[in-house]
Amino acid sequence: MKPRSSLLTEKEKSCMKMNWLVTLAAVCVLVPSVHCATGSGWCYHDASCNDTQWGTLFPSYCAGNRQSPIDIVSASATADSNLTAFTFTNFNDSSALTKIANTGKTVKVTLASGVQISGGGLSDTYDSLQFHLHWGNGSSVPGSEHTVNGKRYAMELHIVHSKATYGGNTTLAVKDSTGLAALGFFIEIMSGNETGQPAKWNLLSSYLSNIITKGSSFPIPAGISVDDLLVGVDRAKYYRYLGSLTTPTCNEAVVWTLFKDPIKVSKDVIDRFSTTVRITDTSSQYMTNVFRSVQAAQSVTTQSSSSTSGYSLGLMCPESCSGEGLEPLTLVSLHSMVLLDRYCQQRRCCQAEHSKMKLVFNGCD
Ligand SMILES: *[C@@H]1O[C@H](CO)[C@@H](O)[C@H](O)[C@H]1NC(C)=O
Ligand SMILES: *[C@@H]1O[C@H](CO)[C@@H](O)[C@H](O)[C@H]1NC(C)=O
Ligand SMILES: *[C@@H]1O[C@H](CO)[C@@H](O)[C@H](O)[C@H]1NC(C)=O
Ligand SMILES: *[C@@H]1O[C@H](CO)[C@@H](O)[C@H](O)[C@H]1NC(C)=O
Ligand SMILES: *[C@@H]1O[C@H](CO)[C@@H](O)[C@H](O)[C@H]1NC(C)=O
Ligand SMILES: *[C@@H]1O[C@H](CO)[C@@H](O)[C@H](O)[C@H]1NC(C)=O
Ligand SMILES: [Zn+2]
């Protein structure tokens, strides 16, 4: 029932209408997951070990010439038709987030095995190992690592992946110039005065009070999927460049993907990160300004304009979706039914409701 053609004709665009059923089957294979190698002896705040010193403390690789993060200059991003849609496997699994931990440098969530990505111009399938966050000082001081045209967002979410062929052995992955893949999502303060939004971000941040000190961790109860956290992001629109880990030892092994749309999170939820977790014990300072300064520019690519603006269409979701953070009519620009298929599968309510969706192309009744 899924059309095979990758491009629609003008005629199809103007007169097409269809009902679409998302079929769902549970896939839940949960195995303890692997941890990423981390450096030690570095910090964000003391002059003796902050990021101005990393190049000296860790000459290989923090002093290299393919370092992250960078400022993305959107006008300089060149078109690459290889940057197709991703396939996200088990991002919809609400038991995939297993543990939340305070590492003293960030808040890290371990993912169950079986969460993976492929496509997106990547050469291989990559296992999703963990995600963590970077932030400044609450909603008042932004703390994303990457910036876009000089703009720093409130926070940045990094989902860290390792090439599946390495079986989670990150020691091997960091020796490969594309051994790791990181998905970066910007987090922006939601406008208006709503609190506790989105609901799953509110729930995730409620666990911070269980991991106040460095080294503490807390098992995450089932109920949050990775998709739940990526609200409002069109995952077909992103920037790509080759860079590094943004913390020592800064290995130059990362294929970076930065999604253009930010995730909108209410101010109170953002503030919780800089007012709950601490860098060592209960009397130490709060974890704030946990991001590296921008590094030398790298060449950045993005989708060719023809692949993201072929035409516009409307995506209708059923009544049962309202209140789920999805507008009843979301305008998207996608060039093929295959992309649209994936776009819809990423939408939480469409999955949660196992529902029928109606696709209406602009210009048709
Ligand atoms: C997740 O999505 C996949 C592919 O769309 C589907 O087969 C699976 O049943 C979904 N799982 C859940 C828990 O919704
Ligand atoms: C890091 O230390 C240097 C001095 O070595 C200081 O100038 C700089 O402001 C510090 N940066 C941060 C973010 O604390
Ligand atoms: C797209 O991928 C092909 C095959 O890997 C490669 O030869 C080509 O240079 C890539 N195109 C761009 C614009 O990077
Ligand atoms: C963060 O902001 C709070 C409240 O504005 C302030 O009291 C605190 O000193 C700030 N912390 C840092 C490290 O700037
Ligand atoms: C990773 O691979 C290396 C080289 O094969 C091996 O020495 C090391 O024990 C492996 N690490 C883990 C955690 O399996
Ligand atoms: C939130 O904003 C709306 C519209 O500006 C206002 O009517 C409402 O009173 C505000 N609510 C709170 C709790 O401040
Ligand atoms: Zn990171």
Image (tube, helix red, strand yellow):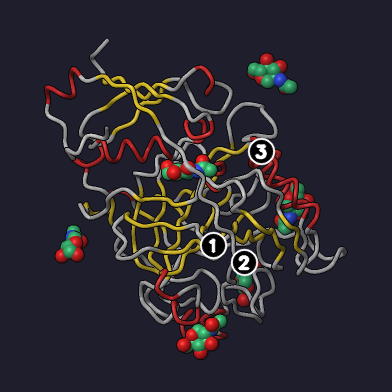
- Three-letter code for the amino acid on which mark 2 is drawn: Pro
Q: Which mark is residue 113?
A: 1
Location of residue 53 with respect to 316 vertically, above or below: below
Distance of label 3 from label 2 (alpha carbons): 33 Å
Tell me which residue sits at (26%, 21%) in the image: 361
Query: Residue 133, position in %: x, y?
Result: 60, 56
Pointer 3 local density, CA inside 10 Å: few below 14, some 14–19, many at least 20 = many
- Disc 1 or disc 3, which is closer to the eye? 1
- Quick one: 162 or 235, which is closer to the camera? 162
Q: Which mark is residue 267?
A: 3
Q: Which mark is residue 32?
A: 2
Location of residue 223 with respect to 58 vertically, above or below: above
Q: Quadrant of the C terminus?
A: top left
- Three-letter code for the amino acid on which mark 1 is drawn: Ser
Location of residue 104 with respect to 170 vertically, above or below: above
Tell me which residue sits at (55%, 77%) in the image: 248
Distance of label 1 from label 3 (alpha carbons): 32 Å
Q: Which mark is residue 70?
A: none
C-beta proximity under 8 Å, tags 1 and 2: yes
Q: Is residue 153 left or right of residue 215?
A: left
Tell me which residue sits at (72%, 52%) in the image: 274
Give the quarter the ligand 3 occupies: bottom left
